[in-house]
Amino acid sequence: MTVENLLKRRELILAVLIVLLCIGTTYINPNFLSLENITDLLKAFTVLGIFSLGVLMVIVSGGFDVSFTAVAQVTQYGIVALMIHMGGGNIYLAIGGAVLFGLVLGLVNGAIIHFFRMPAIIVTIATQSLFYGIMYVVTEGRLIYDIPGYFWEFADARVGEITSAEGFGYGFSLVTVLWVVLGVLLYLFLAYTKLGRSVYAIGGNRISAERIGFNLCRTTLFVYGAMGAIAGFAGMVHVAIVQSVIPNSIVGTEMQVIAAVVLGGASVTGGKGTVLGTFMGVLLFAILSNSLTLLKISSYYYNVFTGLIILVSITANAIQSQRQKRRRVRVQIEPVLAEERHS
């Protein structure tokens, strides 16, 4: 890879921005780079990070989904209420049930989109309102604070714990490690399996992908089903972290997740995006949010930055796509012109 191509990679640009932001924030507030702050920061953005992995798959496939927060919200409420009603259970049963329930809701999205040939954004806006609305009607907006103790144990578990001189324990949260592991598994799946390659193929060109033998139905159902399953898992992680179930605590964060994925280099037209870029996009958002807090800047600016990042990222992707098209046209035309000169 040449230096010119390396400088064009979104991951390198994000890495530079992250380093500069870290240096600037640490200069003003040295507490930023403390182990306690870094581990708490990653834990706080783990739910957004898990969501982003599912959204990456959807966007790469050429689709769009804004219902994943509603899926997570409905799933967490239903599973926690069921665990309480059963009078027990464990974290494995809760996560397994949430993943299965989320998978079913995601398949509903995928089936409608594929079999009825409806725009994904319209379908998922509708199902977001449908899932969320049904939950509110059934629960009447009641909050759940009496969470089973194993959720706390799950959120409080650490990997590689270190004890400071003052006796405080620090370490990476288990939920954060699970986010990273899930990201590695998704990378391996997309890079080394036929189904994973089909996600990129149908996102690049659905007609061509179908002609060369990729099953559009299977891929579409898989992508949206996986998004639902990931949303269900994220819902359980959210319950563990906040230790409550509040019906409107997740819905409304869709744009932050989508912005992180697009910032990481995923193209909204499909066929392009990486797990590493997505992870770095989430990391940049996390650092930006934490920096505003440490620098005592109003949180309202976070929404301004989110909208600006989406706009700039989409514009950058569009400009890059136009340049690539011009290069392809030039490559196709130059041989023809050369033949005409010789004839």
Image: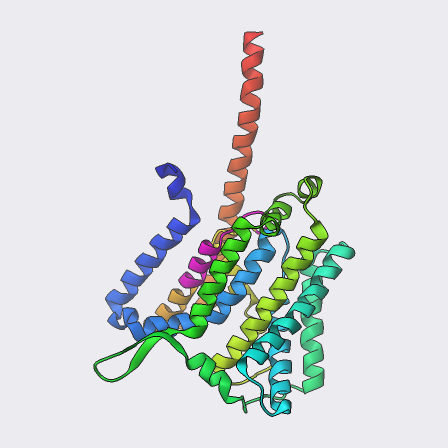
Work out which residue is located at the far top of the displayed protein and give it: 343
Q: Position of residue 88 (x, y in %)?
A: 58, 90
Seen at 40% across and 39% down, the residue is: 5
User: Does residue 285 belong to the magenta stretch?
Assistant: no
Residue visible at 50% across and 64% down? 182
Q: Quadrant of residue 116?
A: bottom right
Instruction: Report the span colored magenta.
Output: 268-284
Q: Residue at x 48, y 66 (%)?
A: 49
Q: Nearer the viewer, residue 51 or 28?
A: 51
Answer with left or right where residue 103 lies relative to residue 161.
Answer: right
Residue positioned most to the right? 116
* Vertical comparison of 249 with 126: above or below: below
Q: Position of residue 327 (x, y in %)?
A: 52, 31
**Image check: 36 left or right of 104?**
left
> Which residue is pictured at 48% across the width and 82% down the height?
242
Whole-percent x and y of residue 35?
A: 29, 72
Q: Is residue 55 visible?
A: yes
Asked if 240 appears above or below 199 in the picture, the reply is below
Q: Which of 294 and 198 lies nearest the eye of the viewer?
A: 198
Report whether 317 appears left or right of 20.
Answer: right
**Residue 184, percent from left and from top:** 47, 59
Q: Examine the rendered structure and indicate whether residue 62 appears above or below residue 240.
A: above
Q: Is residue 45 visible?
A: no
| Number of marks present in the image shown | 0
Q: Quadrant of residue 42?
A: bottom left
